[in-house]
Image (spheres, rainbow, N blue to C red):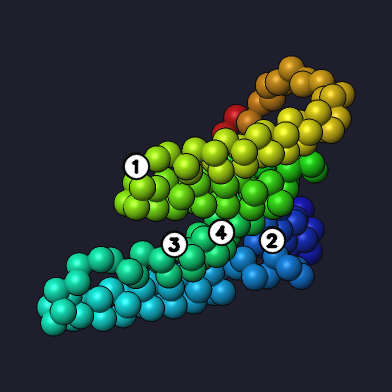
Amino acid sequence: MSQGVITNYKNEVISQNQAKPPVQLNGFAKLFSRIPTTLHAFLYFSVMGLLTLIWALRVSRTGLRFFWPMFPMFGWGFACGWHIVLYFSYNNKIQFLSKIRERPYFGAFFITHAWFYISVSSFLIVINVLFSRFPWSAFAIIGWGIAFGFHLIIASLMEPQNKPQVKPIQTEEVHYCSKCGANFTDRPDVNFCALCGNKLDE
């Protein structure tokens, strides 16, 4: 085999075994890349830490122990948490969220609805427990829960029902280099590795 053929074959094998580049986020999705999300989270925790420090200093002077920073924590926390959740879904950090976002009638809008329903409902429960014995938060949670349930049902019904048939898995003989791990399954006639020069397993 000539030197030119070996060189071309080596370049082909290298290109086939290189890792795929990461998916680039475009448009609105750029807001949920790593750097904007990290900066948002850092700013949130820094400001909340400062407010907590101010509260602690005032408690030592005035004796008023009501934890007022909880209101900005929850208020800003709704947006910051939403930012982090969508970061996980857009960057495949949590497969469950990524699969929901990729479904045509669910997407980021459904994840946003679910996040705000859960987080705001939690806030209402905390406020209800702290300031009232009457469970008024249950009315808001149930009312919003009905709307969220409709969202879930409608999105599920609108998805196409004709799912692709799952083909049985066909096994094939794996042909690879035992030294460098290069895959030659699609080239069963090759008996040596152009990457390392090792003789391939029979």
Amino acid type, mark 1: Arg
Q: What residue does disc 1 label?
A: 133
Up the image or down, 47 lies above or below 170; here it is below
Locate residue 153, reporting x and y percent: 73, 30
Point out the frontmost of discs 4 and 3.
Answer: 3
Locate residue 11, reporting x and y percent: 72, 61
Q: What residue does disc 3 label?
A: 74
Amino acid type, mark 2: Val
First in residue order: circle 3 vs circle 2: 2
Q: What residue does disc 2 label?
A: 23
Amino acid type, mark 3: Phe
Badge 2 marks a residue whose secondary structure is loop
The CA span between labels 2 and 4 is 21 Å
The CA span between labels 2 and 1 is 51 Å
- Disc 1 and disc 4 in contact, CB within 8 angstroms: no
The CA span between labels 3 and 2 is 33 Å
- Disc 3 and disc 2 in contact, CB within 8 angstroms: no
First in residue order: circle 2 vs circle 4: 2
Point out the frontmost of discs 2 and 1.
Answer: 1
In the image, 198: left or right of 73? Answer: right
Locate residue 170, reporting x and y percent: 72, 20
Q: How busy is the neighbourhood of tag 2: few (under 14 within 10 Å), some, or many (20 plus)?
A: few
The CA span between labels 3 and 1 is 21 Å
